[in-house]
Image (spheres, helix red, strand yellow):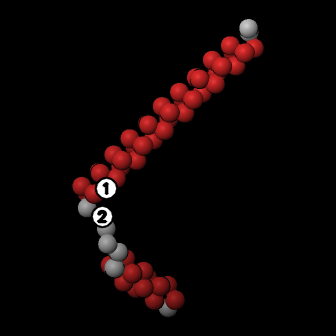
């Protein structure tokens, strides 16, 4: 009995969910990917600058 009531409540609750449209999902996915790429490039640049600084200081 508990499982049946639980299943009915889950179905009722899932009908109340407002799902995003495909275009909205595509826009948000693109934004996340671009932000991730930008952040990765930024951190790579910072890493390279620090590496060059340490090489310059240590081997001088």
Quadrant containing the C terminus is top right
Residue 32 pos. (x, y %): 40, 47
Quadrant of residue 53 in the image?
top right
Query: Is there a contact, CB below 8 Å, between mark 1 and mark 2?
Result: yes
In percent of width and height, residue 14 lies at 37, 76
Residue 57 — which label? Answer: none
Where is residue 13 drawn, in percent x and y?
Answer: 39, 81
Q: Is residue 49 left or right of residue 42?
A: right
Task: Tell me how many marks there are.
Answer: 2
User: Pointer 2: what residue?
Assistant: 20
Q: Residue at x 59, y 23 (%)?
A: 49
Left or right: where does residue 40 sit relative to residue 33? right
Disc 1: which residue: 25
Answer above or below: position of 12 versus 54: below
Does residue 46 lie above or below 20 as drawn?
A: above
* Residue 11 in view (yes/no): no
Q: Please give the name of the residue rendered at 28% of the width and 57% of the height, measured from the top-left corner.
A: 24
Of the residues under marks 1 and 2, which one precedes in the sequence? 2
Cα separation between marks 1 and 2: 6 Å
Q: Nearer the viewer, residue 2 or 16?
A: 16
Task: Give the structural element (helix, strand or loop) at label 1.
Answer: helix
- The x and y percentages for residue 19 are 31, 68
Q: Where 50 sits versus 21, above or below?
A: above
């Amino acid at each position: 009995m508990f499982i049946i009531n639980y299943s009915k409540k889950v179905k009722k609750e899932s009908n109340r969910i407002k799902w995003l449209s495909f275009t909205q999902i595509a826009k948000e996915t693109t934004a996340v990917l671009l932000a991730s790429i930008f952040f990765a490039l930024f951190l790579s640049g910072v890493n390279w600058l620090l590496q060059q600084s340490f090489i310059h200081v240590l081997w001088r």
